[in-house]
Structures are given as structure tokens and as C-alpha cells.
Image (tube, rainbow, N blue to C red):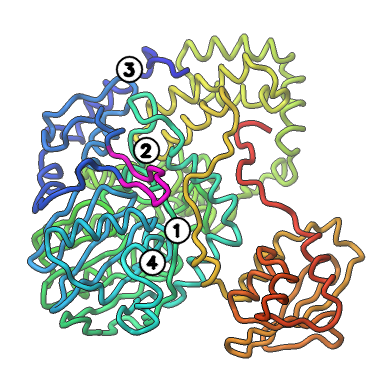
Amino acid sequence: MAHDATDHTRAAHRAAAADPLLDFSDERDFLAARRGFLGSIEPPVVAAADGRTVWDLRDYAFLGDPALGADGPPAPLTVHPSLWRQARLNLAHGLHRIHDRIVQVRGYDLSVMSVVEGDTGFIVVDPLVTEEVARASLDLVRRHLGERPVLAVIYTHSHVDHFGGVLGVTTPDDVAAGRTRVFAPEGFLDAAVRENVVAGTVMGRRSVYMYGARLEKGPRGQVDAGLGKTTSGGTVSVIAPTDEITVTGTRVVIDGVEFEFHLTPGTEAPAEMNFALPEFRALCMAENCSRTLHNLYTPRGAPVRDARVWSRYLDDALVRYGADTDLCFTSHHWPVWGTEAVVEYLEKQRDMYRYLHDQTLRLANRGETMVEIAEQVELPPELAREWYSRGYYGTVNHDVKAVYQHYLGYFDGNPAHLHPHPPVEAARRYVEYMGGADAVLSRARTDFERGDYRWVAEVVHHVVFADPENLAARELEAAAFEQLGYQSESAVWRNFYLMGAQELRTGVPVSSETRMGPTIFQNVSISLVLDALAVRIDGPRAIGVTFAIDAVDTDDGTRYAIWLQNAVLHHRVDAVCAAPDVVLEAGHDLLAGMLYGVVPLADAIASGLARSAGDPDVVSRLHGLLDRPDPAFPIVLP
């Protein structure tokens, strides 16, 4: 059961509300978030075909009407006042005209779907996380702009909230027939699918914490996700690009509208691109800019992003397009209008990431460690006073650590940290050294009353890992997490803390909100399927086991040599094994399904769509060595 804010948390919020850098009476963002409003989905609810609710903004009614602006309901005692402001802004939903030929649908997923009006049809940019909300959003567009075909889809980058709803705006048949083109940056498909297949289970589990999707919506629960309200709970899909952008400056005319693409690999995503619309004096900055400090390291887990490269690409965009841009729109939040404002926005976002980069390395070169540096670095006032530099999604603390990790890794050079005990073994030793669980909890309760919640969480964590059945320890750690969540300006930190508190109290749920549709699997290369299998091989069980499989994709004739050796599953493309135990032949989708184990080999052969020669039991032996990923593994419990 959630508790009230303590006196210490209330004092922290009073201090935040009085921060001289922040002008809480500033109405400009509230006006921009509602500018050009055409209409909305009413009620703001989206359901799947089976009746499941995948999106419901009514849960956020406690935030009040964003149209009230800064005069809306004040922040409750359990929400950081700056985060409360962002949460209210992200509640502004509906269809908005941002240019004579460009509209945005905002507020129906974590991300924003933009639509460019061509001469005869629509060009959809970033079709949200799931099919259901993308379809409802396109219906809203057509309700106000008329029935037109979707002639192109643009994925600005390889994160799921920018492609997952594609089957809600077009179909594989339309793409195959050339009626819809799909544009993406170079390397998009590999980056997009790899993230959701090879490391998808662990990222998905941590995403539940990051977006707080299982928290009750309310002042003591989930209020926002920084980039938007949260992620939708529908079906994720993908269609492979028909047009891959490989060179910056590439110009393409789509339905009478000229696009100029600007590749930015290794910034917010491994594969990402901005684009300019020169005739419209408009610039889409994908997710390289947003109305928040972004993550250089995302807490859900992903490769660390390069702050220096990110900053350089922002400067490149500024040089290429800044003086010729009257409108800057992005894949989240509301746009910036006016050349002077756009230039300032790009400059300050550029400087924000570069400052964090440079100051981290300055202090690292003085011998400061990752944790020490993160406690010292703050954005200068010129940047920190901008609402779009606040840490609603990324944080200065984590971004500094990301810069350090990018250059130096997680090890701080101290040999005491070379080979520490794993968490449970360390916890048992810590608790014993500190005089036992009762002694630790007694002192921790005193620290809790003093408001030292960070320390309470750190110390009591050891008691919980030493004895997860100690309910008093779990409750005290949950109470500390709760106050830390209430005090967090970052929606992501708040969600992590409150999810941790919830699972300490109630355990780990097993349900999953977002469903991977079959197109994810169909667009995976056979090579990536085999990579995904390799990371599931149970090494100890595979010791001494050997076999060889030749697989042929009859759709394009590509051959794959697959073999197990030294407990490692290997494969080569355009190769064959010297002495295969079995040879499999099938079209791409069926072959991928057979190899991954979702299509029984016997059924595929019986259907006449697949052939095998040799010992088919080898495939069963392969599947018998696979570990089963756990989508509900514990995080705050051992």
C-alpha cells in the first residue's frame, strides 16, 4: 500500500518549486502543446480486436485539463513539481496542424506520429509502438483531412516506438505491390530487430520498470514517462524498408514533396536520421532533440550512446538547416516555431550533450570515478533553466555515468572492485558484518526518519538479498524507494523506484502488456535467428555435444552452415558443412520458424512446404539445448 509523502519529501518539493532557475508561470509550452488543435479521439480509448484496452487516457484525469496551462491543479505532495508540469503537458492529446501540409497526432502512445500531406496521399512518419493506436491515429487524421492512401512510411530510427505500429497504417500487400514505400536509415532493420530479439527478454522486463506500465495511474503511482505518458499495450509489427537511406544529403521526392535526409548513426539510436522539407522550411529532428534531456544510457538497457557524436550531429543539422527552418518537429512532444527559436533550441540541445561529455572526461582525467563525477556535474544555468533540458527522461547523473562507461567501462580502476562477490553472497556477508538483520533495520529506520532514503535503500537492499522472506526489510526498502520516487524529477527514475516498491510488496507479476506480432519474426534474417538461438544455448548442457546442419532458404537460395562445437552454436552464410547431419530446405519464414522452434519440423515437412534429408532428430537435439528466457525475472528480489 502506497504511503504519503514524508516531511522530508515535502521539503524537497518546496525547494524545487522555489528553484530560481525555473519559471512555473511560463505558459509557452502549454500554448505550443495545444497549438493547431483539430480534434481528438473521444473518449481517448483504443481497444484491440479482442476487446483488450491498449490505451486509455482517462486514467490520467487526475492531472487536470492541459488547456488550463500553468493555472491547472498544483502538484500533489507525492509528485515533483517539475515532473508534474511535464506530465500535464504530455496529456495534451489529439490531432494538431503544425504546418499547412504537416499534422501530428500526439498523446496516444509514448511517441508522436507525424503525417505529411502529399499531392495525393499521406506520408506517415514514425507510426507509434503498436498497430492498434497507429490505426486509431490514422483514422483521426482521415476524419479531419479526408480519405487518402498512405503512399509512404518513414521510420526515423530503430526504436520500437517509431515503427511498431506500421501495420496500423499500411499492409504488406501494399508495400509489396509498390503502393506504399517504406524509408529508413541504413542499418535500420538489423538494429530494430536485434534489440527486440537477441536481448529482447531482458530489455522488455526492464522496460516494465522504466515506463511504469504496471503501476496504478495516479499521484502516488505512474504519472508520466518523460517522453510521453507510457507505452501502448497492443501488437508490435514491422515491415522491412523498401528504400534505405545510405548517404546524408540524399533528396527524394515523395508524392510531390521533396525530402532531404540527414543520417545520424550512433546518436539516440544505432540507426537514425533527420530530414528536412526545404519547400516547407521544416526540419524533423527524429529523437535527436526532444523536450527533455535524453538518455545517453537508457535504464532499460542498450548500448551506450556517444555524447560527442550526438552533439556533433546536432551542430551539423544546425549548420545545414538552421537558417532555413521555421518549424522544427520531433518524434516526441510539440514542435518549435520560428527560425530564431529553432536555432536556439538546436544550439542548447547540442551544448547540453557536449557539456556532459567534456566535464565528465575533465574530471575522469583528474582521477575521479564514475560515481564521484556523477555527484558533481550539473548543467550550467544557461542550459538548466530551459524546460527542455530538464531530466524528465534522461538524467545528468546517468548521462555522466554513460560518458564514463563509453570511454572507460564500468571498472573504476580500484582492485577492490575487480572481482566482487555476487549480490546474494555479498549481502549475506554485509548483514553478518553489520550485526545481523535486526541491527541493520534498527539503524536503517533511524536513517529513514532522518530522510536519508538513498542510504536506507542501499543498506536494506543487503538484508533483502540475504533473506528475501524478511518482510520488515522488504517494507522498509519499499518505503525508501517510494519517497525517492516521489522526489524524482525524472519520470523514469520515479517509475523505477515505484515499480521496485510495488514488487517488494506484492511480488513479480507474470503478464506482459505489449505483444510481438508475427511480422517481427518474418523480418528477421536467418542469420539473426541463429544469433538469437546461440545466446539461448545452455553451455553446461551442450558440453561434448556436436552436430552440423545445412539450411537452405528456398526464397533466395542462400545456404547456411550451422554447427555446434565446444558448446557454442556457430553459423556461416553462403556456406555448407563438410558432413551435415541433416539438410533443411524451406522458404524464409518457415525456415526461420523451424530453426527457432516455433514451427515443428514434422508439421512443416508434412505440409509439403519444407524438405529434409538426413537425421531430423538433430533439430530436436538443438532445441533440447535451448534455455528458456524468463520474462518475469526478479529485479529487487534475488
| Image x and y of residue 293, in percent | 33, 48
Q: Which residue is mark 1?
A: 236
* Residue at (59% x, 52% y) in the render: 201
The residue under label 4 is 157
Alpha carbon separation for disc pair 3 and 1:
40 Å
Q: Measure the C-alpha gap from mark 4 to mark 2.
A: 24 Å
In the rendered image, the quadrant that contains the C terminus is: top right
3D distance between C-alphas at marks 2 and 3: 17 Å
Q: Which residue is mark 3?
A: 10
Query: How many numbered marks have been drawn onto this rendered protein structure?
Result: 4
What is the C-alpha distance between the residues marked 4 and 3?
40 Å
The amino acid type of the residue labelled 4 equals His
Q: Is residue 580 above or below residue 185?
A: below
Is residue 124 shown in magenta? no
At 83% from the left edge and 65% from the top edge, which residue is drawn?
A: 621
Which sits earlier in the primary sequence, circle 3 or circle 1?
3
Query: Where is residue 412 drawn, in percent x and y?
Result: 61, 47
- Which one is nearer the viewer's eye here, 454 or 274? 274
The amino acid type of the residue labelled 3 equals: Arg
Three-letter code, disc 1:
Val
The residue that mark 2 highlights is 490
302 w.r.t. 87: above or below: below
User: What distance separates the C-alpha of mark 2 from that of mark 1?
Assistant: 26 Å
SS for callout 1 = strand
- In magenta stretch: residue 53: yes
What's the residue at 34%, 68% (across, down)? 156
